[in-house]
């Protein structure tokens, strides 16, 4: 796995920009690979070709076009190749059904906080899921 590399799937460019800003502000050096939907996540993983090239964390939003976060989550977790890559759902959803879906796959779901200070804490929590090999 690529140490400190995050594959971040979110169709909201402003959210991605804020996350990068928080990581830089907190001296966290992560390479963030931005994709806009689940299909791009799957394409990235398939093109990586080998475990050494996989990201150390995948962050998925639930509400994305083409392939949403839930379908992407299920495909990753059902894949022998990709199932061990750490994954977190980071979404505006607060739905109990979405939470149950994430629990089914033993994946943490974090709801995007409404203010910057809480967002900063949430982002730092997210990166604690990175696998360091």
Image (cartoon, rainbow, N blue to C red):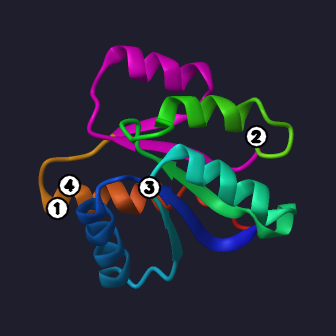
- Pointer 2 with pointer 3, Cβ within 8 A: no
Q: Residue at x 86, y 37 (%)?
A: 80
Q: Which residue is mark 3?
A: 36
Q: Which residue is mark 2?
A: 83
Q: CA distance from mark 1 to mark 4?
A: 4 Å
Q: Residue at x 67, y 60 (%)?
A: 44
Queried whether the magenta region covers residue 97, the answer comes back as yes
Q: Which residue is mark 4?
A: 118
Front position among marks 4 and 3: 3
- Pointer 4 with pointer 2, Cβ within 8 A: no
**Nearer the N terminus, badge 1 or badge 3?**
3
Q: Is residue 49 above or below residue 100?
A: below
Q: CA distance from mark 1 to mark 2?
A: 32 Å
- At mark 3, the secondary structure is loop
- Pointer 4 with pointer 3, Cβ within 8 A: no
Q: Which residues are magenta?
A: 84-110
Label 2: few (<14), some or many (≥20) within 10 Å?
some
Q: Which residue is mark 1?
A: 117
- At mark 2, the secondary structure is loop
Q: Is residue 128 above or below residue 24?
A: above
């Amino acid at each position: 796995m690529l140490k400190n590399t995050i594959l971040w799937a979110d169709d909201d460019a402003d959210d991605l920009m804020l996350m990068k800003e928080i990581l830089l502000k907190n001296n966290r050096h992560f390479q963030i690979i931005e994709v806009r939907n689940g299909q791009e996540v799957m394409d990235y993983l398939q093109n990586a070709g080998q475990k050494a090239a996989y990201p150390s964390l995948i962050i998925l939003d639930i509400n994305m076009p083409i392939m949403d976060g839930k379908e992407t989550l299920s495909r990753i977790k059902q894949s022998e190749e990709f199932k061990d890559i750490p994954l977190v759902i980071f979404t505006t959803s607060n739905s109990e059904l979405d939470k149950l879906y994430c629990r089914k796959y033993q994946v943490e779901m974090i709801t995007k906080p409404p203010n910057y200070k809480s967002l900063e804490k949430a982002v730092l929590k997210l990166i604690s899921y990175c696998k360091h090999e």
